[in-house]
Image (tube, rainbow, N blue to C red):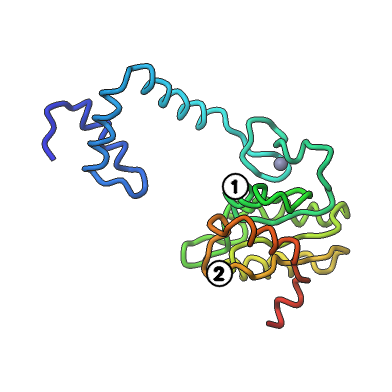
């Protein structure tokens, strides 16, 4: 692609780094941003800068937050002894939309996946085990997507905590295998949280 402007070319190159965006789409988007009133495009770049500079991870559950403790952890109405273990923030959003979980979350930041070079130590697992060890957790609900990586991660955590006094459950598999949690519809997901089964039972299936 030949550009008459180095500035435009730079912008197109940056935009085309985004997932699913080829050079042609990047050029269309760049030209769209150029045609817009300047303050709209400035607003976009300001929002992006603030997001990368100022976003924090909640020091308790590792959810993305604007404050040290996220709104969910800081909410006194939540049950602090029931923790739903999820892969990432999209799962927190999906489960919050169902309004079926009144407890807290623990965001792992991914799943164990040797193929992608992700081991247990790349994830927020040790802080979860510490919470369980402290005796403040009555139940852990595993809500990872029902894939091989999700199952491996659940089982790894289960092994770490089974000697402690804590119940473990897993969301009912109303969600078909391979579906990611975030794409499940709210009613199915909500029901699968309410109808969760003891984790040990899921191992026998
Ligand atoms: Zn939190």
Residue at x-position 71% and y-position 55%: 126
Labelled disc at residue 43: none
In percent of width and height, residue 201 lies at 75, 77
In percent of width and height, residue 12 lies at 25, 35
Query: Where does the C terminus fall, quadrant-wise?
Result: bottom right
Residue at x-position 59% and y-position 64%: 145
> In which quarter of the view is residue 17 placed?
top left
Circle 1 residues within 10 Å: few <14, some 14–19, many ≥20: many
In percent of width and height, residue 65 lies at 64, 35
- Asked if residue 25 lies left or right of residue 71, the reply is left
Q: Residue furthest bottom?
A: 204
Q: Secondary structure at mark 1?
A: helix
> In which quarter of the view is residue 2 placed?
top left
Badge 2 is on which residue? 147
Determine whether 3 is above or below 150 in the image. Answer: above
Q: Secondary structure at mark 2?
A: loop
Badge 1 is on which residue? 89
Residue at x-position 85% and y-position 63%: 166
Q: Is mark 2 within 8 Å of ligand 1?
A: no
In percent of width and height, residue 37 lies at 32, 18
């Amino acid at each position: 692609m030949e550009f008459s402007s180095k500035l435009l070319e730079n912008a197109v190159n940056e935009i085309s780094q985004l997932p699913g965006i080829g050079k042609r789409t990047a050029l269309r988007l760049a030209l769209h941003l150029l045609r817009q009133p300047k303050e709209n495009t400035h607003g976009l770049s300001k929002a992006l800068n603030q997001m990368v500079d100022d976003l924090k991870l909640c020091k308790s559950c590792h959810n993305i937050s604007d404050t040290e403790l996220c709104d969910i952890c800081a909410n006194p109405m939540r049950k602090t002894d029931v923790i739903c273990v999820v892969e990432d923030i999209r799962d927190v959003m999906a489960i919050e939309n169902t309004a079926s979980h009144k407890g807290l979350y623990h965001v792992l930041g991914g799943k164990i996946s040797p193929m992608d070079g992700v081991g247990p130590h790349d994830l927020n697992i040790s802080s979860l085990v510490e919470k369980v060890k402290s005796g403040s957790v009555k139940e852990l609900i595993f809500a990872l997507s029902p894939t091989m990586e999700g199952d491996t991660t659940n089982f790894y955590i289960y092994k770490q905590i089974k000697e402690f006094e804590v119940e473990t459950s897993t969301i009912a598999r109303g969600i078909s295998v391979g579906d990611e949690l975030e794409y499940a519809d709210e009613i199915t997901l909500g029901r699968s949280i309410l109808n969760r089964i003891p984790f040990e039972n899921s191992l026998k299936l």
